[in-house]
Amino acid sequence: MTGAARSGTQAVDRAIAVLRSFEGAAEQTPTEIAARLGLTASTAHRIVRALHASGMLGRDPRTERYHLGPTAAILGRLALERMGTTLLQPELTALRDETGEAVSLGVRVGDEVAVLLHLPSAHPLRYDQEPGARNPIHVCAMGKALLAFDDGRVAMPEPFRRFTPATLTTRAELAADLARVRERGYAVNDEERIVGVRAVAAPVRDSAGRVFAAVALQGPAVRFGDDRLPDLAKAVLAAAERLTALQRR
């Protein structure tokens, strides 16, 4: 690869990193971006100016802080429509209303699950996660549903990051859990990422039968007890079947 090609690739990689930095911070200054990504201040300012000129970033003139801009919003909306998520939202709403619990739709991005849609519960005690949030794949129900019905492989080195005493930290532990997921058809996050939070998830397939997303119910463990979990799992499985059917129309 020539020096010019390497430089061009590096510039693209840095621009992508700047855009992705907004997943964890809605508004940032170039200085904050530089510190977050380990860039020089001049490099961060140059990239931010270019992204602002393209509409990928917007700027608040009062605070001089940047945020995702109209071009990013348009592209995101088009991507969601391409994936059929706008078609799926009524079914997700129905699942939320049926169970009274928060509903999420997520897809795999490497060894993480990216939340595409989230419908909060009306309960004052609840667990919310904003669209765009990313969760390590081994500690969320959606991640395990995606792994169990795909290739099941992760690139993370062992031991996997531990979040709670219940976290699965080895490939052997994860493989055993995925076998149970395949047997019953749904995955459970049993306080593996956050103590006091449980979730149940099932895979959603596209028109070719491939798993492309997962749908989940999440909430406090006090409402997701072993006595209620089978009913929640049944509701998630039924919703996943309806979501899959929509992809085949």
Image: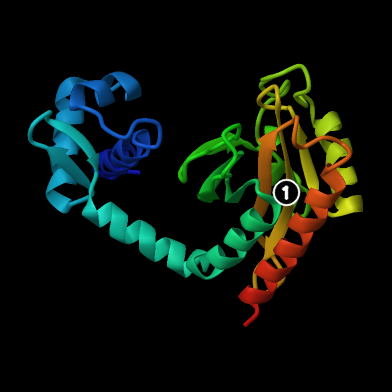
Which residue is found at the position 68% from the left and 46% from the top? 217
Residue 36, picture quadrant:
top left
Q: Residues within 10 Å of mark 1 (few under 14, many from 20)?
A: many
Residue 171, picture quadrant:
top right
Question: Residue 129 in the image: x percent, y percent?
Answer: 52, 38
Query: Which residue occupies the foreground of this view, 46 or 231?
Result: 231
Question: Residue 155 in the image: x percent, y percent?
Answer: 66, 36
- Tell me which amino acid carries mark 1: Ala
Rendered view: 106 above or below 173: below
Which residue is found at the position 85% from the left and 30% from the top? 173
Query: Quick check: 53 left or right of 161?
Result: left
Question: Residue 51 in the image: x percent, y percent?
Answer: 19, 45
Question: Residue 190 in the image: x percent, y percent?
Answer: 78, 31
Element type at mark 1: strand
Query: Which residue occupies the foreground of this view, 196 or 23?
Result: 196
Query: Quick check: 136 left or right of 57?
Result: right
Mark 1 highlights which residue?
201
Residue 71, picture quadrant:
bottom left
Query: Which residue occupies the foreground of this view, 132 or 219?
Result: 219
Quarter of the C terminus within the rendering: bottom right
Residue most extreme to the left: 61
**Colour scheme shown:** rainbow
Which residue is found at the position 67% from the left and 27% from the top? 193
